[in-house]
Amino acid sequence: MELLQRYVELLENGTGTVPATMGAMMAFELFDPKGEFVVRQGKLPHWYQPGVTYFVTFRTDDSVPQAVLEDWRSQREA
């Protein structure tokens, strides 16, 4: 709980970043849906849970063929 409170304090103080030393204190663990966690909303929701390892997936702008991208957009707007 102490680590979670520290993370929330950092966010509320406007820094928006977690010091590397805090990350070094955490072991490799998966998200526990029954455990405590914080969800902050910006452009996308950001989930935080102490001791959890995160994976980020992204793609470059031109990695999806234009025809596929147009199909996705039309499906989303339908």
Image (tube, rainbow, N blue to C red):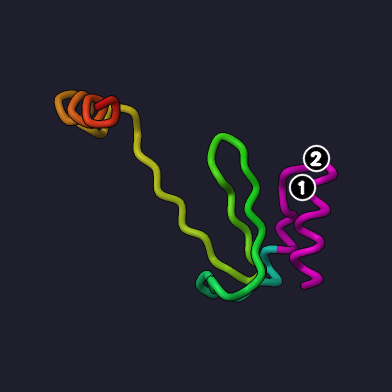
User: Image quadrant for the C terminus?
Assistant: top left
Q: Residue at x 78, y 42 (%)?
A: 15
At label 2, which amino acid type do we have?
Answer: Gly
For numbered disc 2, what is the local secondary structure?
loop
Residue farthest along the front direction in this orientation: 78
Residue 63 relative to residue 15: left or right: left
Q: Residue at x 53, y 40 (%)?
A: 44
Q: Which residues are magenta?
A: 1-22
Residue 70 in picture, x, y percent from top left: 20, 24
The residue to which callout 1 is attached is 11
Magenta includes 8? yes
What secondary structure predominates along the stretch shown in magenta?
Answer: helix
The residue to which callout 2 is attached is 14
Q: Residues within 10 Å of mark 2 (few under 14, many from 20)?
A: few
Q: Residue at x 80, y 63 (%)?
A: 5
User: Image quadrant for the N terminus?
Assistant: bottom right
Magenta includes 39? no
From what the image shows, is residue 75 above or below residue 5?
Answer: above
Q: Are marks 1 and 2 in contact (CB under 8 Å)?
A: yes
Q: Residue at x 54, y 75 (%)?
A: 29
Residue 67 in picture, x, y percent from top left: 14, 25
At label 1, which amino acid type do we have?
Answer: Leu
Residue farthest along the left direction in this orientation: 67
Residue 43 relative to residue 25: left or right: left
From what the image shows, is residue 33 above or below residue 62?
Answer: below
For numbered disc 1, what is the local secondary structure?
helix
